[in-house]
Image (tube, rainbow, N blue to C red):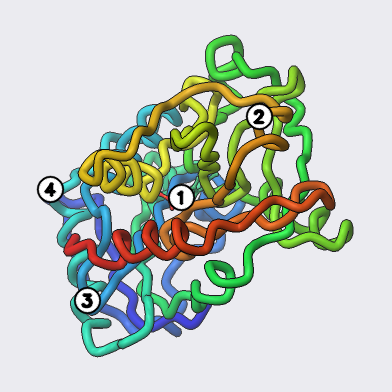
């Protein structure tokens, strides 16, 4: 990640304020709960020529995560302004940039307001993943498919700052010679990637698993399904089994910084990469104006 811009929010004053800083500046206290416990939430929105993509969906998911973690309701007008300020500063970049915005529970022990900031950065080039395809392994997430109902305190489906588990899963994938992961529930339901939403094409229909399984509502998947509907291509939200993945016509992992990346192997088994469909999906994503 190459940081380009930084905007700090002061959420302790009525209405909040936004101040611009050098991205190298040290601003967050060492006793901030975001740092000491990973207790906070975040979003990453892709930015093309200074325009944040799927911004409203990211803001809605930010508010959803805050509710799931009993954090104060974020003032979305303020956060929208902070993200737009960060994005506008990157308007002269030709490459894909992104804004990561973060709200933590604030200072440990103090009855303080949350801490917030928006960091603009240069995203990794999504082209190689889109063109070459990903080698993916299936990993057990260790929770049942109904974990969100039975144990909401496990925060499955919240975009919390605690992503060490997601990163550990990616390291396990590397150890197995793969690029990425699809998580399964302990009772065999297909979930999502550590930083992506799965889409499968089966019998001509694009299918993604439901968020009731304790996964994130993907903003990229949401835009892809809207584009498919515009083109008259069928899509639906439905549960998927490992066998569904093995027999699917094509599979993609989708995210804000990588677009739709096709899967070329699953646990070492070849999956057909549909280059034409991949190009179409990503052309639609790249044509977004917000
Ligand atoms: N699922 C998880 C766990 C994620 O972390 C992400 C994004 O980072 C996604 C899905 C994809 O979401 P989006 O398309 O909004 O980037």
Quarter holding residue 153: top right
Looking at the image, tell me whether mark 1 or mark 3 is earlier in sequence order.
Answer: 3
The residue where tag 1 is placed is 107
User: Measured from the top left, where is residue 274 in percent x and y?
Assistant: 54, 57
In this view, the mark in front (4 or 2): 2
Q: CA distance from mark 1 to mark 4?
A: 18 Å
Looking at the image, tell me whether mark 4 or mark 3 is earlier in sequence order.
Answer: 4
Tag count: 4
The residue where tag 4 is placed is 14
Q: Residue at x 47, y 25 (%)?
A: 210
Q: CA distance from mark 4 to mark 2?
A: 51 Å
Looking at the image, tell me whether mark 1 or mark 2 is earlier in sequence order.
Answer: 1
Q: CA distance from mark 1 to mark 2?
A: 46 Å
User: Quadrant where the C terminus lies?
Assistant: bottom left
Q: Are marks 1 and 2 in contact (CB under 8 Å)?
A: no
Q: Are marks 1 and 3 in contact (CB under 8 Å)?
A: no
Q: Quick check: 267 above or below 248?
A: below
* Left or right position of 260 against 169: left
* Left or right position of 171 against 217: right
The residue where tag 2 is placed is 244
User: Measured from the top left, where is residue 119 in percent x and y?
Assistant: 37, 70
The residue where tag 3 is placed is 50
Task: Please tell me how crowded label 3 is: few (under 14), some (14-19), or many (20+) other residues with Cα within 10 Å.
Answer: many
- Element under disc 2: helix
């Amino acid at each position: 990640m190459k940081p380009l811009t930084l905007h700090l929010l002061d959420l302790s004053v009525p209405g909040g304020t936004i101040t611009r800083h050098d991205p190298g500046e040290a601003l967050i206290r060492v006793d901030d709960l975001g740092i000491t416990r990973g207790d906070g939430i975040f979003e990453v929105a892709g930015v093309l020529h200074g325009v944040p993509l799927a911004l409203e969906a990211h803001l809605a998911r930010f508010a959803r995560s805050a509710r799931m973690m009993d954090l104060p309701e974020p003032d979305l007008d303020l956060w929208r302004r902070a993200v737009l300020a960060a994005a506008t500063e990157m308007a002269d970049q030709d490459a894909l940039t992104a804004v990561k915005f973060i709200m933590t529970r604030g200072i440990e022990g103090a009855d303080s307001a949350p801490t917030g900031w928006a960091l603009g950065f240069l995203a990794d080039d999504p082209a190689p993943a889109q063109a070459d395809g990903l080698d993916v392994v299936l990993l057990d997430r260790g929770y049942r498919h109904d974990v969100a109902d039975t144990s909401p305190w496990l925060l499955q489906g919240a975009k919390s700052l605690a992503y060490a588990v997601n990163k550990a899963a990616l390291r396990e994938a590397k150890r197995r010679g793969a690029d990425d992961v699809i998580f399964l529930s302990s009772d065999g339901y297909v979930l999502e990637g550590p930083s992506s939403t799965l889409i499968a094409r089966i019998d001509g229909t694009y299918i993604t698993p439901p968020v009731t399984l304790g996964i994130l509502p993907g903003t990229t998947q949401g835009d892809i399904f809207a584009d498919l509907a515009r083109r008259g291509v069928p899509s639906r939200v439905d549960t998927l089994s490992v066998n569904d993945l093995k027999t699917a016509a094509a599979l993609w992992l989708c995210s804000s910084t990588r677009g739709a990346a096709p899967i070329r192997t699953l646990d070492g088994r070849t999956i057909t990469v549909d280059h034409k469909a991949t190009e179409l999906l990503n052309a639609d994503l790249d044509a977004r104006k917000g």
